[in-house]
Each structure stands twice: as structure tokens, then as C-alpha cells.
Amino acid sequence: MQFRIDQQIAARLADVEAALLDAEFVAATATLPQLGKPEVLEQQRDGDHVLQRVRYHFVGQLSSAVTRVVDPDRLSWVDEARYDLATHTQQHRIAPDHYGDRLEASYDVTLTGAGEHTRRLATGELKVHVPLVGGRVERAIVGGITEHADAEAELLGTWIAGRRT
């Protein structure tokens, strides 16, 4: 299933990029719905290129259709992101800690600055390899991704504004 998320963030582009790569901001995302405390596993910088790996744990409610095929306690994954700060792009690959044979996901992000706001456009693909219920699970996951991205966009604006004062 392909997905697209187009958002406006109430902060300048440079501040948004800096926050996304700030371990304190990553930790602050623990307040967002459905995800537990994230863990920065790695961050390597080489000029305008940054590799950042963050482990996430799903802690939200799941439908019975999903819990028939996955154990909620085993829903953790690593988001491996490659940032290009010169082009303001990111490439993300999701690597499940468990169920790697059942889920494939990746997405790209482009940030575009417009004064005091930043547009974040994410496009990606998610595939659940489970007969009969895969499509329903994909829709549920993409819905959760969208909800999380919206909450993160709001948190970015608030967090960055709080840093300026």
C-alpha cells in the first residue's frame, strides 16, 4: 500500500531538521500517542549526511484482526533514516525487530522551507505479507503512521517555539 502525508510545520526548515536529529526531541516524542519511549541507537554525521537509527515500540491498542497474526509485545522496529541536509531529504527504511518476513516498509521525506513554516512531504510504501487480512492491517498501520506524523508535526512546532524563549 502506498501512502502520502503532506504537512505544514510551524517552524523554520533549519530548526525542523535540527530537532529531528536532536536526541532530546526524539525522547520528547515518547509523549505522542501509540509509541513508547524511543531509543536512539546510532547517529553518524559526515558533512551534510546523517545516518540515524531509532528503535520504537508500539504501545497502542490493536484490533483483533491484527492480534491474530502478531503479538503486541513484539511490535518494535528500527527506523533507519539517511538525511541529506543539503537537499533537505530523508530516506527511511523500517526494520522490524520481529515479523520481518511479514512487513516491509520504507518512505522518503522532503522538507521545503517557506519563511516561518516548513512543508513536510512523506511518500512511502508499506506491505504486510499476511493472507486474507494483510490489506486491512496495512490500512490500520498507515492510519497510525498518519496520526503519529500529525502529532509529531504539532510537537515539532511547539518544541521548537519553546526552545526560542
Image (tube, grey):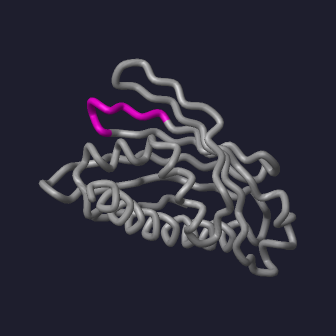
Image height of 53 relative to 158, above or below = above
Query: Closest to the observer: 120 or 44?
Result: 44
Quarter of the rendering occupied by the N terminus: bottom right
Residue found at the very far front of the displayed protein = 165
Quarter of the rendering occupied by the C terminus: bottom left
Please give the range of residues in magenta.
82-88
| Residue 86 is one of the magenta-drawn residues | yes
At 45% from the left and 63% from the top, the residue drawn is 152
Quarter of the image for residue 33 reads bottom right
Q: Is residue 1 visible?
A: yes
Residue found at the very far left of the displayed protein = 115
Quarter of the image for residue 6 reads bottom left
Counting from the top left corner in percent of width and height, residue 40 is at 61, 41
At 54% from the left and 60% from the top, the residue drawn is 29
Query: Closest to the observer: 66 or 135?
Result: 66
Query: Closest to the observer: 37 or 5?
Result: 37
Counting from the top left corner in percent of width and height, residue 114 is at 14, 54
Counting from the top left corner in percent of width and height, residue 44 is at 52, 25
Query: Closest to the observer: 113 or 31?
Result: 31
Counting from the top left corner in percent of width and height, residue 58 is at 70, 63
